[in-house]
Image (cartoon, helix red, strand yellow):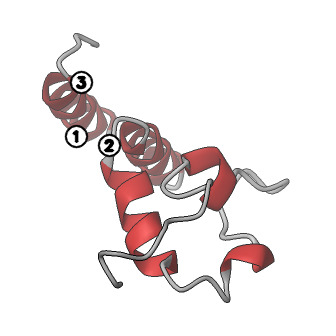
Amino acid sequence: MNENAERPYCFARLEEVFPMGDEGLRHVPERCMPCYCKTECLKQAVENDHGATVKQEMLERAEASGRIGFFERWSKRKALAKAKGGRRG
C-alpha cells in the first residue's frame, strides 16, 4: 500500500471489516473485496486489541470441535490475556 494514500474510515475496525456472520463465523464483507488496502486492513484488525477476541473465538471453536482439549485452551487463553495485559482464568 502507498504510505501516502488515505485509509478508508473503516480501516482495521474489526466489526466493520471482519464482522460476525449469522452462522457464528466471521467473514469479510463484499464491500471490502475491491479495497486497495484490504490485506493490510484485515491484518491490523486481527492484530490489535480486538484481535484477541478473534483468537478467543477460534480457541472456543477448536475446543468445541475436539481439536484441542480444555487445558490447552485454558493455557492459550491465559497467554492471550497476559499479552493483552489483563488477567483471565
20 or 71: nearer the viewer = 20
Q: Real-space Cα distance between discs 3 and 1?
A: 14 Å
Q: Is residue 67 visible?
A: no
| Residue that numbered label 3 is attached to | 81
Q: Position of residue 82 (x, y in %)?
A: 14, 23
- Residue at image coords 33%, 44%: 48
Q: Position of residue 32 (x, y in %)?
A: 68, 75
- Left or right of 5? Residue 69 is left
Residue 23's quadrant in the figure?
bottom right
- Residue at image coords 50%, 43%: 57
Q: Is residue 5 above or below residue 12?
A: below
- In the rendered structure, which amino acid carries the disc numbered 1? Glu
Q: Is residue 44 visible?
A: yes
- In the rendered structure, which amino acid carries the disc numbered 2? Gly
- Work out which quarter of the rendered image holds the C terminus and state it: top left
- Left or right of 22? Residue 81 is left
Q: Real-space Cα distance between discs 1 and 2?
A: 5 Å
Disc 2 packing (10 Å; few <14; some 14–19; many ≥20): some
Q: Real-space Cα distance between discs 2 and 3?
A: 18 Å
Q: Nearer the viewer, mark 2 or mark 3?
A: 3
Disc 3 packing (10 Å; few <14; some 14–19; many ≥20): some
Q: Give the label on residue 72, or none.
A: 1
Q: Position of residue 43 (x, y in %)?
A: 37, 66
- In the rendered structure, which amino acid carries the disc numbered 3? Ala
| Residue that numbered label 2 is attached to | 69
Q: Position of residue 19 (x, y in %)?
A: 68, 53
